[in-house]
Amino acid sequence: MSSEIALFVNPTAGSGRAAHAAQPAASALREAGFSVRSVVGVDAPDALARLRTVVREGAGAVIAVGGDGMVSLALQALAGSMVPLGVVAVGTGNDFARAMGLPVREPARAGRLAAEALKEGRFREIDLGRVRGTGTGQGQAGGTWYGTVLCSGFDSRVNDRGNRMRLPAGRFKYDLAMALELASFRPFPYRITLDGGPVIETEATLVAVGNGSSYGGGMRICADAVPDDGLFDVTIVGDCSRTTLLKVFPRVYKGTHLDHPKVTVHRAAKVTLEAAGITAYADGEPLGPLPVSAECVPAALRLLA
């Protein structure tokens, strides 16, 4: 393994926390005897192109410093390779780090953990989701990779609306977007195919395909998902009324919504979702409109843990 480690940094993540977090992470790696090379792009496509070049040139590992968006970008370069990923989670949501049991907003500790794992050759092989069918996203023709949750339905409509709004800023924007979506809420007609079986035609509030357990900064929509079992957890929230949705949705933070009679969970390695007018998001990033197909690819990533 090369002793040069690529520090993949999003300087804007967490309102600038990533730029500061990169320093203790780099120090921990250098103290362990590794050389560190920073990789920073002017935008996401440029950052990914730079990272792919560094990986081709033989980096010993990549340490993503930022939030779930930065991890998602790193996955596009690392999936299916032997180059391991470390995570210094200092973004807003940090759902990938939480699902993998990694430190959150503790950059020095995360850097030491990555350095120790590299020194000891300690890796965890985890599954990743690979999405095809949208023709968009950061992936190549082989699909777009994700590590946590692919979501569609009410939650993605909230994201769509929030992304179109200039004001207010931060989380308030999405709170307002949710209130506005609730005002016109209705379940969506879905066609769902699991592992090539018969098509499930159903009215659903949302469908989430989880490799990890949570999204949106700790909403445990696929609470029992295991990222190294070769299967997705597919959470289907059925045809809720507006009142029922308001009662059920807060339970997502503890994962207790899975007990509700309107919620069903399936496990599958391949999932196809079809619904008109719905955008798919994965790792919090927009993929494009349904239909999409997602495949759980076993042991697609080596994680420093």
Image (tube, helix red, strand yellow):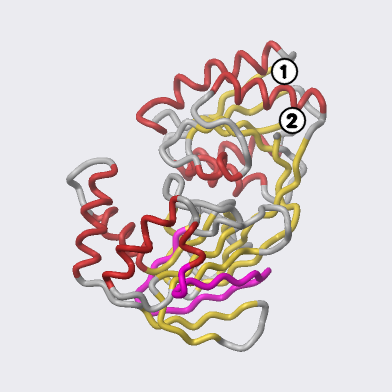
Residue 32 covered by magenta stretch: no
Taking the spot 51% from the left edge, 44% from the top edge, the residue there is 95
Left or right of 187: which side holds 118? right
Taking the spot 43% from the left edge, 67% from the top edge, the residue there is 152
Q: Which residue corresponds to mark 1?
A: 34
Taking the spot 62% from the left edge, 88% from the top edge, the residue there is 198
> Which region shows up in magenta?
260-281
Amino acid, disc 1: Phe
Q: How far apart are the alpha carbons under marks 1 and 2?
A: 9 Å
Taking the spot 44% from the left edge, 56% from the top edge, the residue there is 252
Q: Position of residue 192 (x, y in %)?
A: 53, 80
Mark 1 near mark 2, Cβ–Cβ under 8 Å? yes
**Neighbourhood count class around disc 1 (C-alpha, 10 Å): few under 14, some 14–19, many 20 upward:** some
Q: Position of residue 19 (x, y in %)?
A: 45, 23
Q: Position of residue 171 (x, y in %)?
A: 29, 44
Q: Which residue corresponds to mark 2?
A: 60
When asked about the image quadrant of residue 122, the answer is top right
Circle 2 — which element?
loop
Residue 276 vs 6, above or below: the answer is below
